Amino acid sequence: MNDQEALEYISGYFGELFDKRNLEALDDYLDPDYFDDDIGDPAVDHISNSKEYLRQWFIEQPSIGVEVRGVSVKDDVISAFLEWYVSENGIKKVIRRGVAIFVLRNQRIIKRHTFIYYEA
């Protein structure tokens, strides 16, 4: 996978989740052994936990979106610069910026961690 392919992959992932609100896309994008460092607890189902977290976030922040600002790929690891935003009266307001690291196995995300470096 090159950087352009990685950009398309990650943009598609966030598009399914944040534009279409398609939480079932997690079943397609995430490996069955998916582990999310931000969840951390190995005793929970990380895919189900992610679906519930996003479902609640969409209720609390109905206009939440994510913009992929750039990616870099090395081997099976994609680093993505992301901006989370809300729309207020047609104006995008950035509420968070971060770098997410996605480790792939067979074109599916097996592990993820996000480093937030800005929060409004």
Image (cartoon, helix red, strand yellow):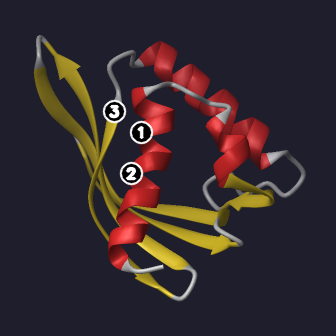
Q: Amino acid at mark 1?
A: Gly
Mark sitting on residue 15: 1
Amino acid type, residue under disc 3 in the picture: Gly
Residue underneath mark 2 = 11
The amino acid at mark 2 is Ser
Residue shown at 77% from the left, 37% from the top = 48
**Picture residue at 73% right of the left edge, 43% below the top:** 27
Circle 3 is placed at which residue position? 65
Which residue occupies the extreme right position in the image?
A: 43
Q: Position of residue 56 (x, y in %)?
A: 58, 21
Does residue 39 appear to the left or right of 85 in the view shown? right
Q: Residue at x 49, y 47 (%)?
A: 13
* SS for callout 3: strand
Q: CA distance from mark 1 to mark 2?
A: 6 Å
- Percent across and percent down for residue 62 are 39, 15
**Other residues around mark 3 within 10 Å, as few (<14) / some (14–19) / many (≥20):** many
Secondary structure category for the residue under label 1 = helix
